[in-house]
Image (cartoon, rainbow, N blue to C red):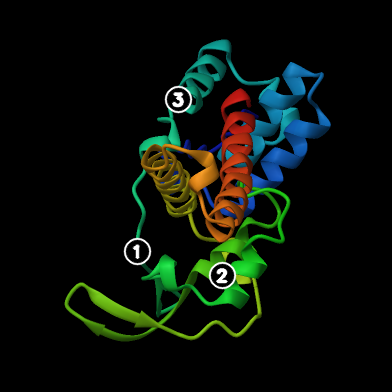
Amino acid sequence: MKETLEITIPTSWGDITLRKWLELQTDLESYKDNEEAQTASLFWHLCGIPADKTRLLPKSSYTHIKGKLDSIPTPNSLELQRLVTIGGVEYGFEPNLGEIAYGAYADLTQYESAGIDKNWGKIMSILYRPVTKKVGDMYSIQTYTGVADDTIWLDTTMDIHYGAMFFFLHTSMDLYKDTLNSMTNREEIPHNIRRILAESGKLILQFTNSQMAMLKK
């Protein structure tokens, strides 16, 4: 008896959750020296095709699915989604990064990488907090409590996560370049400004390293 397998192929980052993406990255790393196993992991995590069924697919179906996955656009053009509704609760992205609470800043900088990894959900829970007041395009969010919980973010989609990550990457790089261009003599830079630039440079390096790792994969 011929078995029918229903397949759903993601066509955008809005079809892939953070949970699926993290599980996929774990498998890709485990099978980094086995291309066939990596492809089987892609089919399983993104399309729900068990590994033992992948080898039974007609060659035309295999090629079609692989082509669809390969054609998902690169995420660096995704825009920041300032407001996100999860479970009926509206969350807002930190509306004023220049005035972010020190506790939130300190918690953000404790992570070794600012890329999409096992800590990313916690980073998102610091940046996005429940909206407490909204007037037009303006809004306020809940005060940071010092608790970083990634639970609710695991089942949100990657368009949200990459939008936030690349917003930071682009903003940090622009700020860093503009600041350096305004300084003509390093000796004239006050000590406190040099310290801030050094900390910012560290964060920018983290973002850049995470981006390069992602593009290589």
Disc 1 is placed on an element classified as loop
> Which residue does the image show at 56% across and 44% down from the upper left?
204
Numbered mark located on residue 136 in the image:
none
Which residue was labeled with disc 1?
82
Mark 2, Cα crowd under 10 Å, few <14 / some 14-19 / many 20+, is many
Give the mark, 3 or 1, whose residue is nearer the N terminus.
3
Q: Secondary structure at mark 3?
A: helix
Comparing marks 3 and 1, which lies closer to the viewer? 1
Residue 40 lies in quadrant: top right
Tell me the crowding category of disc 3: few under 14, some 14 to 19, or many 20 or more residues within 10 angstroms, Cα based. Answer: few
Residue position for label 2 = 125
Along the line of sight, the residue nearer the viewer: 49 or 119? 119
Distance CA(mark 2)–CA(mark 1): 13 Å
Q: Which residue is located at x 50 percent, y 67 percent?
A: 127
Quarter holding the N terminus is: top right
Q: Identify the residue position indicated by label 3 in the image.
A: 68
Instruction: Specify the amino acid type for callout 1.
Output: Arg
Q: Nearer the viewer, residue 194 or 56?
A: 194
